Image: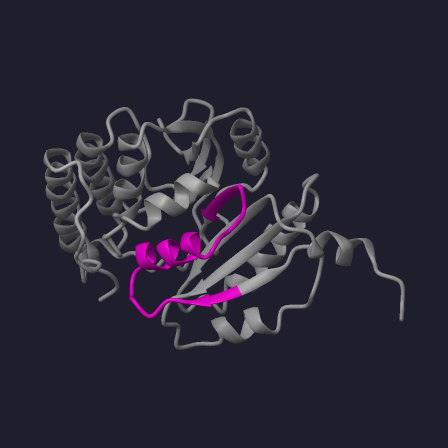
Amino acid sequence: MPPSQPGDERASRPPLLEVVVPARNEEQRLPGGLLELCAKLARMPFPTAVIVVDNNSTDRTAEIVKNWPRGAVPIRLLRCAIPGKGAAVRAGLLGTTAPFVGFCDADMATDLDAIDAACGLLLSGERVVIGSRGHAGSHVENRHSKIRELGAFGFRALAGVLVPGVSDTQCGFKFFDGVLARETAALLRTPGFAFDVELLARCVGRGSPVREIAVRWHDKPGSSFSPARHTFGIVLELGRIWLRLRAQSRTPARPAWEPPLDPVGYP
């Protein structure tokens, strides 16, 4: 039997950090994104792992993950039949077991050096650490149209009602205490793009404030979000989140039955 390699020994140990990557028809962007992520996680001073959640892809997304070469950072494939980024992230978080977990987008638009800062804060006792493009120290390269920028401004105003004090709920870079993430993900009922708002609002409601950190963020082509197609659904999602959280505040006891995920996701 050949001697084990350092990467094999590391991969066999339980991860301290697991990173979830939601993916829907990401065969073009996923390989490069996974290369970046694995290279970064392999340099961390503790075992790490990646979970890619295939969200009803019709391309080679799942095949890419299944055939990914074995390395120092194990990659696991999960499937989520419920359409929507929120549903995929929820499934990924519920599939974790590590003490610390997070998620990031397949395009790795957020510079992954921010993982160092996020993990440092988690190790120091913070329970929710998110990248914020609104942070004074962030560097943002944005190619969005004026219409999309206007829509983002309106979204931030509405999200601010649900998560006061958080300048950017939608940056696809969020890290958590693992137990908190799994307990909160189990309560999520928003499958679409506004799921971040419900996730953060529920964390705050459980006594875990949100810590925002500076990031370097570069807008990359290929986003599935379309203002024309998704704005109305997102407004509906925010309204449902507000009603759900308001009802929860009036009824602190958890009901024996919970409604399924709202059917507002990818069209």
Q: Judge left or right: residue 163 versus residue 99.
A: left
- Residue under the image location 51 percent in, 51 percent down: 97
Q: Is residue 107 magenta?
A: no
Query: Relative to residue 4, is residue 254 depicted above or below?
Result: above
Query: Relative to residue 188, is residue 30 depicted above or below?
Result: below
| Residue 124 rendering spot, x and y as whole percentages | 55, 24
Query: Relative to residue 231, is residue 120 depicted above or below?
Result: above
Q: Is residue 81 magenta?
A: yes
Q: Judge left or right: residue 51 versus residue 241.
A: right
Name the quadrant containing residue 143: top left
| Residue 151 rendering spot, x and y as whole percentages | 21, 43
Name the quadrant containing residue 259: bottom left
- Residue under the image location 22 percent in, 58 percent down: 261
> What is the span of residues highlighted in magenta in the rendered image?
77-103
| Residue 177 rendering spot, x and y as whole percentages | 46, 37
134 or 158, nearer to the observer: 158
Name the image quarter holding the N terminus: bottom right
107 or 82, nearer to the observer: 82
Display coloring: one colour
